[in-house]
Every structure is written in C-alpha cells, then in structure tokens.
Image (spheres, grey):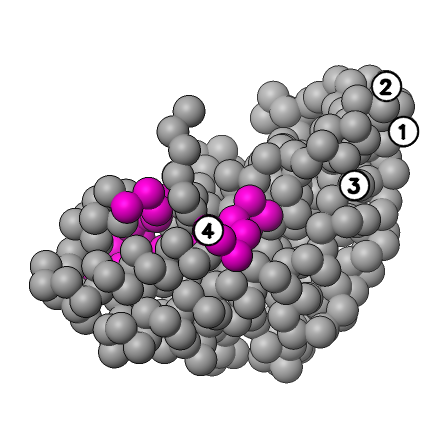
Amino acid sequence: MTTYVADLLSDTLTRPTRAMREAMASAEVGDDVFGEDPTVRALEQRVAGLLGHEDGLFTPTGSLANQLGMRLHVGPGQEVVADQNAHVVRAELGAAAVFSGITSRTWPSVRGRLEPSGPMSLVTTGVGPYQVETALVVVENTHNFGGGTVQPLDAIREVRAATSAVGVGMHLDGARLWNAHVASGVSLADYGREFDTVSVCLSKGLGAPVGSVLVGSSARMAEARVWRKRYGAGMRQVGILAAAGLHALDHHVERLADDHARAARFAAACAEAAPGSVDAATVETNIVVLDVGAAGWTSAAFVAALLERGVRTYAVGPAAVRLVWHLDVDDAGTHAAVDAATAVLRTPA
C-alpha cells in the first residue's frame, strides 16, 4: 500500500482505530434480515433519536441510504429537485432514474449553499397530466462539492414551510451532518426534524469502516427495509459493523473540530500563497476546494505535482482540487500538506 505524508483524497479513507476494532470484535450479533441483530437495532434507534425521528435503518452505503430515502417519497415519473452539484444527482450514477424511475431537475448554487428561492423556483405541483410533479426536495449538509458548506437552519426552515404547504417532501443527505453540527452548534435534532427522512454516514469523518443510517417514521423505515432487501442489500450478522458506528458516536464526533481547524489553517496558507485560490473565510468544516487556475495550474497538473510531494488530493473540475481532512491526518500531515501546496502554488505552472 502506498504511503503518503498526507492523504487528503477523502474522509472515506479513515481506518478503524484499535479501540473501534475491539468494539467490533466483541459485538453481540444476530441475523439482521430477520431483525435479530441487537447491535444493529441499538445503532438504528440511537441515530434516529439523535436526529429527532422514530426509527432508523442501517445500510452499507450512503448512496443506498439516499436512494431509499428518495424511493420512499417519489414515484416513477415524478421528480426530485436538488442543487446542481448535489451528491444525489452528480455522484450516485443516475441510480434514482435507473432503479426508481425518478426524474430530476437542479437549481444553481454558490458553494452549494441553500437559498430558498432555488428549490422553490422549481417545485411544480397540481399540474395534472401536463407537467412532471415535484415530490421531493433534497438538501445536502454539509455540501461536499461546495467545499464542506454548512446549510443555514433558517433557510432550511423556510424551504420546509414552503414545501409543506404544497405537499412536497424533504430529504436530507446528511452524510457529513456531524460536521455541520460541530461547526455550527446546531443540534442534530434541530436539523433532522425539518426533514421527512435523513441519511447520515458513519464511514467518513467518524471513522467507521462501513455504513450509513437512514431515519424517518417507523412506517417509512418498515417500507425502506423492504426496498433494501429488494435492492439486494439485506445483511446478516452486521452488528460487527454497527458496533463500529456506535463506537464512533461515542468517541469521534466532537473531535471533528480538529479536522475543521486543520482545514482552515491549510486554506489560510494557500490564500496567502496564491490570492484567489481560496477564500479562507468560507472554509467551515473539513473540506477545502482550491481554484488552482488562479495560480495558472490545471487540476490534473496540480494533483500530480502534490502527489510527487507525497500529498494525495482529488480533482473535482478542470481547475478545482478538493482536499479533505479526517481522523488519519494529524498536525504533522497538515504541515506537510501546507508546505507542498504553497510551494506548488507559488511555482509557475
């Protein structure tokens, strides 16, 4: 396995700690398809409670949790609306259309930040057989491709009031909701209660090796359990994985603030080295998106140049490079990333 001085490709790279592995090894398990895994049930109920909902469903991936959430709200031929860079429309490979017959439209956004006028300009209801009916608005918090943007609670509540008035549901792609909670101080329940369904990921900043949880009403989770099995994702003695999630909730939530601080430190250094490459004031959580074009670089060339210096990153556009802090990048790794990135930004492409 290649070793990097700082691997900032994604926060999905985190490896379970020794204590997490011990929790996994000692987990009480049962057959989850039959609802007999006590550790899974403990995780589902705990996450649902944290988010202000009745019940939860453990899934192997965040994409599946999102797809199940959309499937619960949107019938074939109806539409979901999301922002133009939302994970559900950009990074889930058209699954909503392929598996559920769902169409989609998107609104433009700046850094993925929710402005209520965006979704409400698209929501269409009561049009009979003449236009596609909107059934669901999806909001992503934090926003991945927006650079870890934290969504304002007031904006969420404004959209919620407007959608409720016309009978349109809301789903939260909360893969990194833990980061939003730590950065903003807004409780998980205050975020969660504004949505009919919420997905949260355990295998990013929280450091679990696998898993997400979808939450909602008990009735919706019962239906989601059927669809999970129908999609081929019923699991057996999966309490081994759920135990990692429970450990992460106990030990790895508040430490996300360390990731945020390191990302902010990196962004400030890059902003000084190459003005215009990033607005450090907009870096709220653990993700930094650099506009390397401001220093004359293409994203492919910049990624390659950092890799030569032992820092792995990810191109998200022709001149945009994403770097993500996580459990396995410490102060030393951050220092190495700062040195490498600022040196490259100062070097003519």
* Residues under numbered marks 1 and 2 in contact, where contact means CB atoms less than 8 Å apart: yes
**Image quadrant for the C terminus?**
bottom left
How far is the residue under mark 1 from the one under mark 3?
A: 15 Å
Which amino acid type corresponds to the residue marked 3 in the rendered image? Answer: His
Span colored in magenta = 309-333
Q: Position of residue 314 (x, y in %)?
A: 33, 48
User: What residue did someone put label 1 on?
Assistant: 38
Numbered disc 2: secondary structure: loop
Q: Residues within 10 Å of mark 3 (few under 14, many from 20)?
A: many
Numbered disc 4: secondary structure: helix
How far is the residue under mark 4 from the one under mark 3?
A: 25 Å
Question: Which residue is painted at 39% across and 39% down in the image?
Answer: 4
How far is the residue under mark 2 from the one under mark 4?
A: 40 Å
**Image quadrant for the N terminus?**
top left
On the rendered structure, is 240 left or right of 103? Answer: right
Residue 82 appears in the figure: no
Q: Position of residue 64 (x, y in %)?
A: 58, 37
Label ID, residue 247: 3
How far is the residue under mark 4 from the one under mark 1?
A: 38 Å
Q: Residues within 10 Å of mark 2 (few under 14, many from 20)?
A: some
**Front residue of this view, candidates 226 and 20:** 20
User: What residue did someone put label 2 on?
Assistant: 30
Which amino acid type corresponds to the residue marked 4 in the rendered image? Answer: Gly
Q: Quadrant of residue 238?
A: top right
Label ID, residue 346: none
Q: Is residue 168 magenta?
A: no
Question: Which residue is painted at 25% across and 55% down in the image?
Answer: 317
Q: Residues within 10 Å of mark 4 (few under 14, many from 20)?
A: many
Which amino acid type corresponds to the residue marked 1 in the rendered image? Answer: Pro
User: What residue did someone put label 4 on?
Assistant: 333
In the rendered image, the vertical position of residue 29 relative to residue 116, given as above or below: above
